[in-house]
Amino acid sequence: MHAIEFCDVSKKFHGSAQNAVDHVSFAAEEGEFITILGSSGCGKTTLLKLVNRLYEPDAGSILLFGEDIADADVTNLRRRIGYVIQQIGLFPHMTVAANIAVVPELLHWEKERISARTDELLTLVGLPPEEYRSRYPGQLSGGQQQRIGLARALAADPKLMLLDEPFGAVDPITRAKLQEELLQIHGGLGKTFLFVTHDIEEAFRLGNRVIIMNAGKILQFDTPEQIIKHPADEFVVSMMRSVQEKERFWRELL
Amino acid sequence: MFAEMAGYFQNNMDDFLRAIATHAAISALALFLAAAIGIPAGILCVRHRGVQRWVVPLFQALRILPSLAVLFLLIPVLGTGLLPALVALVLLAVPSILLNTVAGLLQTPEFMLETAAACGMTRGQIWRSVWLPMALPMILTGIKNAVTEIIASATLAAKIGAGGLGEIIFTGLGLYRFDLLLAGGLTVALLSLLAAGSVSLLGRLLMRYKYV
């Protein structure tokens, strides 16, 4: 049984001529860290939002652990899936602890369990609970806010995490640190991660397999090594070339 | 002049206090009704774009009407006394509350609502826990504008026999008694400041996150 399975899924937006997601099929196994790489408008965010049903597909079906998500109750489904976005979306009127507790509260956990879980997660993302628990999002830096965003998504221990360019708006140094920490978190929890990015290095560094998308279609889905060795088509080759050019630029400069 | 004012207060303290009480009661009732209409109507406007298309311009137009005109226009319909005064004050106060509610709700970023949905909140939970709290600062600004408008305009309500501090002012006007004008006018101003201050205080209590 696959953790996620897309079966010939298409999604078209109103007033658009082409499919945003065009007959996509793929499967990912439990515990995998899948990155989805593509330029803006390629359909990668749409693909992600189909998984927690922020969008509904026009055709095809999506299975999570063998269950067709179209048959699931949509709020229950979402409470079982972690979701992190670039704009972070912390609720400004709630404390850090209340933000992390959102999903556990929806699931009616007991108070002690929620506060224990909140402290555990704050520690996991590297923010001391006594210091950060009762702060408000507005008092935190961008990097700290995204740590809370990550903690909120992990709160109810979902088996699947969806991350939509979560580090897109943080500075390069913080980003590298957060990437490292995310890898550690992933390694320790055995969860399946689906991570959208337009940054090639990020995609190849984080993913054990990478999906390369263009114009709503999957061009290649393979391990980073295989993609580098056997790029599927001209588009993938040109992406590789852009990385090499960047590398040359730095080598000449240093 | 101050001696005259002191004399007025000595002899008419009961009337004065009654005028304040009436003024405050009319204003409070009008504010309550305006909020009870304006906030749900604002929510309705955001829920149904079709409603918004005609409700918002209607209330924007209503805002232009001078309070005095509204009061006198209502006399043939509702007669004189408390009821038409109340109706006029509510009509005056609803626009600022309604329009601010709409603006506050619309300025909440789409990704916030999407995140709330992605956490597994139902529609009702999104409204209660995210959308309305995030629009609250704007709604309270609307209420603050409304309450100052109501207290000032309630003075005019005395003209159609609803009582309040306007009575003292109009008596002062009629008799060329500056002490009465001053006593009534200053009290209205003070009442306005007090009410606006209370709303601000309420905002600070409800939105602690803005002041840390």
Image (cartoon, coloured by chain):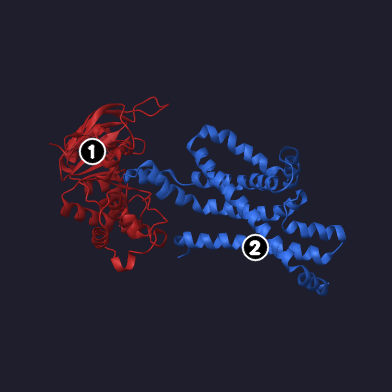
Residue type marked 1: Ile
Residue drawn at 36 percent across, 51 percent down? A88
- Label 2 marks which chain's residue? B
The residue carrying mark 1 is A211
Number of the front mark, 2 or 1: 2
In the image, B198 versus A57, the foreground residue is B198
Residue drawn at 68 percent across, 57 percent down? B23
From mark 2 to mark 1, how far is it between C-alphas? 62 Å
Residue B43 x/y as whole percent: 50, 42
Which color has been applied to chain A in this rendered view? red
Residue A17 x/y as whole percent: 39, 24
Q: Residue furthest left?
A: A1
Q: Is residue A204 visible?
A: yes
Mark sitting on residue B193: 2
The C terminus of chain A appears in which quarter of the rendering?
bottom left
Tags 2 and 1 both on a single chain: no
